[in-house]
Image (spheres, coloured by chain):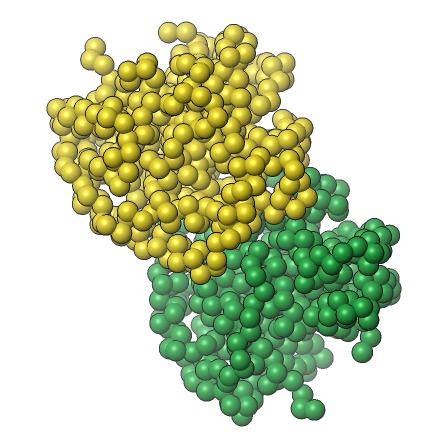
Chain colours: A green, B yellow
């Protein structure tokens, strides 16, 4: 296996044991980027010389933590003290923050090497950047964390940070065929993130394997390493969610096939139907999102309106039209659904739902449909996306495992079992 | 009445009718600042020439909104595109943000004139800045929004923005003898605020009268102007809260006197006792606060540790020691208390509680005891502070009116009635 195919845990272990240098890793990834970046266009800012200097310094210096020497890419809505943070907007072109975002600082303190900033849709909303899908450049990589998903998928970096307000981590993870994770709301501090819908915005992770998510998550949360539970077959609830009919036949097939494979591997697999009130949650999320982003971008709207994309300008105006009463009702509905979600799980460790509506759509104008991720974002619980197989057009198809807020460690234990069960035999 | 004594609504009305120019207002306030600032030290950054230029431009230009020409001061943890934002820390000395915080942009868009940045305790925590109490410079103005409270109290500005995570708006308002208001959590978007304890941080207001809070709040929230309800005698619950015994005799007397005056004026006044589970909420708030601020300041802790105050460094280390299980239990207790709070109000429009533990303590080393404000911050509802009278040392004493989340407009209606009832006759 080449360095560009290694997962983060393996890289960390080899650097720790001395069989690999941080410089070798950085150098291999930079070579890979030089080859792939002209087509994939995953990076908004990268300084190869600085990366190599930092890697050499890590090889020469003391071990800083569990990610010592492991490269990580950072979505360009998170501040970095040594790279500009343009947020996918010409308004912030070349903007250099004074400090790292809290999660970036925590990753650095654990020894991670910040490889570069990745392309985001404008302010992590919908207007896309130039990134293409590494599996077919005529197709979207998904968004808004487009560059992070594509960089991991293209072998440019083993780990990347994203953010999700609707489906901005889990959808690009599905479209690009990598592991995606959105933790419980509030688990990773958002200091240094450009806040948009602040009751929804959540920092998330792209990786090659579930074990890498489990390695990075406690670092970003400022917590001790997770102690994985002994593997046990989980109880999985197959959930043919509200927008099920909007999913492609293939996306639905992947859920059904996965359920059958997990049952074969020993999981208890049951059908779970969410309460009818959950059918309204996509609309609830949209109302909260619109209200909050309209206020988030007050400076941009009043001082820099001509440099906002037409779509974002229109979304801000829509959000300004949402009444406080409607917003408050949406927040109350969200709180009620969060309270009802644990019981709705019917004793399952995770719900199994489609990763996205189907393969990544053709074209780069749209980052795709967020309706298969948005409800789980609203519910504030963890969501783990796993790639499963290719579809008819040769692009990845995946599933999500979701759980109520606070169940991050348990969902990762479940996900590790599922990940192993889904690996090809041998 | 001189210009420096006018409330914001009066200034706005006189500018709108043409009987006062924005330049006259700015000029009078700058003169006042020149006299008082050497002792009060309320400002972290101010550019008098730029203020006068902006005021003249407003006099010459079209009316922008309900705050046209009204000066407002901004706590130095909120970003401003035209003034540095140092956050009370040498680490950010001279730091110039690219953009305004969302609420600052909304105030500007409504015509407000940003007068300057006000002194904050280090990162809105406890290590104080140089501000003194305008009523006696040997006493603290309270904090962390020290400069905002002092500037309003000293006649330097009619309105100011603050933030509250524990008691950082309501305590300095009480100590300086001005109106303070902390809205419901989430009502004012926090984009461009230095996030600390992000499940508690709330942007608030300092003013001379309740009507000014009602004028500014919808501007900051991006909402239409509030339509005041017809005055009606409210139902007031006198709440001898958990730390009642920690309040000075005078602070308790002020609550009892106020209750009697409101009853005389026609309010229904009843005793309200909160559920016993609420006694733990100060500890719950402290645990959430410590956990979150430790993560918020990850970059400062890892990159700039020697330039953090010893108290803040110690608080970060305490917060790093809080387990995720303890933090999650605290969040669950907070959510349960928020859910229980409306019923605990026993039909009252507002609870009447002490504004602070007593008069502002002597000395500038401590900003005082946050135990009379912290529970209401944790409960996420609005809190309105009103000055009532002077204490034995000649410093202000006040009360707070508090209500459950979402009751902002109703609490301001109630507060306006109370404010009128507490004015001296004639």
Please state, as top left, top right, bottom left or bottom right, where the N terminus of chain B lies in the image. top left
Report x, y in % for residue B172.
41, 27
Say left or right for A214 vs B241. right
For the residue pair B101 and B379, the one nearer the viewer reads as B379
Asked which quadrant contains residue A399, the reply is bottom right
For the residue pair B152 and A216, the one nearer the viewer reads as A216
Asked which quadrant contains residue A363, the reply is bottom right
Can you see residue A247? no
Which residue is found at the position 61% from the left and 39% from the top? A300
Which residue is found at the position 19% from the left and 37% from the top? B237
Say left or right for A173 vs B325. right
Which residue is found at the position 77% from the left and 73% from the top? A5
Q: Is residue B66 above or below residue A113?
A: above
Which residue is found at the position 31% from the left and 49% from the top? B280
Report x, y in % for residue B397.
30, 22
Can you see residue A336? yes
Report x, y in % for residue B102.
54, 38
């Amino acid at each position: 296996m080449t360095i560009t195919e290694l997962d983060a845990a393996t890289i960390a272990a080899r650097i720790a044991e001395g069989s690999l240098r941080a410089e070798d890793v950085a150098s291999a990834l930079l070579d890979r980027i030089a080859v792939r970046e002209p087509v994939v266009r995953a990076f908004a800012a990268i300084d190869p010389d600085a990366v190599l200097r930092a890697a050499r310094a890590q090889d020469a210096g003391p071990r800083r933590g569990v990610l010592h020497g492991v490269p990580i890419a950072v979505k360009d809505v998170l501040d970095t003290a040594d790279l500009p943070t343009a947020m996918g907007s010409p308004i912030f072109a070349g903007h250099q923050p004074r400090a790292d975002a809290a999660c970036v600082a925590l990753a650095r303190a654990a020894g991670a090497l910040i490889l570069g900033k990745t392309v985001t849709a404008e302010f992590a909303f919908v207007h896309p950047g130039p990134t293409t899908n590494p599996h077919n450049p005529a197709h979207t990589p998904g968004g808004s964390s487009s560059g992070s998903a594509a960089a991991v998928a293209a072998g440019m970096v083993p780990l990347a940070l994203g953010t999700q307000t609707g489906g901005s981590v889990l959808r690009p993870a599905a479209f690009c065929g990598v592991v995606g994770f959105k933790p419980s709301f509030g688990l990773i501090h958002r200091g240094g993130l450009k806040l948009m819908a602040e009751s929804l915005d959540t920092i998330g992770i792209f990786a090659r394997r579930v074990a890498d998510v489990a390695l990075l998550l406690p670092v970003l949360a400022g917590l001790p390493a997770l102690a994985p539970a002994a593997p046990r077959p989980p109880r999985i609830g197959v959930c043919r969610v509200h927008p099920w009919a909007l999913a492609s036949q293939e996306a639905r097939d992947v859920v059904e096939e996965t359920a059958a494979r997990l049952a074969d591997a020993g999981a208890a697999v049951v059908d779970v139907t969410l309460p009818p009130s959950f059918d309204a949650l996509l609309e609830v999320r949209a109302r909260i999102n619109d209200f909050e982003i309209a206020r988030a971008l007050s400076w941009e709207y009043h001082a820099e309106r001509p440099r906002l994309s037409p779509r974002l300008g229109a979304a801000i105006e829509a959000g300004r039209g949402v009444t406080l009463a409607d917003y408050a009702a949406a927040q109350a509905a969200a709180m009620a659904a969060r309270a009802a979600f644990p019981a709705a799980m019917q004793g399952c460790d995770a719900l199994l739902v489609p990763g996205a509506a189907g393969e990544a759509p053709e074209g780069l104008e749209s980052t795709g449909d967020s309706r298969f991720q948005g409800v789980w974002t609203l519910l504030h619980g963890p969501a783990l996306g796993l790639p499963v197989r290719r579809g008819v057009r040769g692009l990845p198809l995946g599933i999500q495992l979701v759980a109520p807020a606070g169940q991050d460690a348990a969902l990762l234990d479940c996900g590790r079992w599922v990940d192993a069960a889904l690996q090809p035999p041998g």
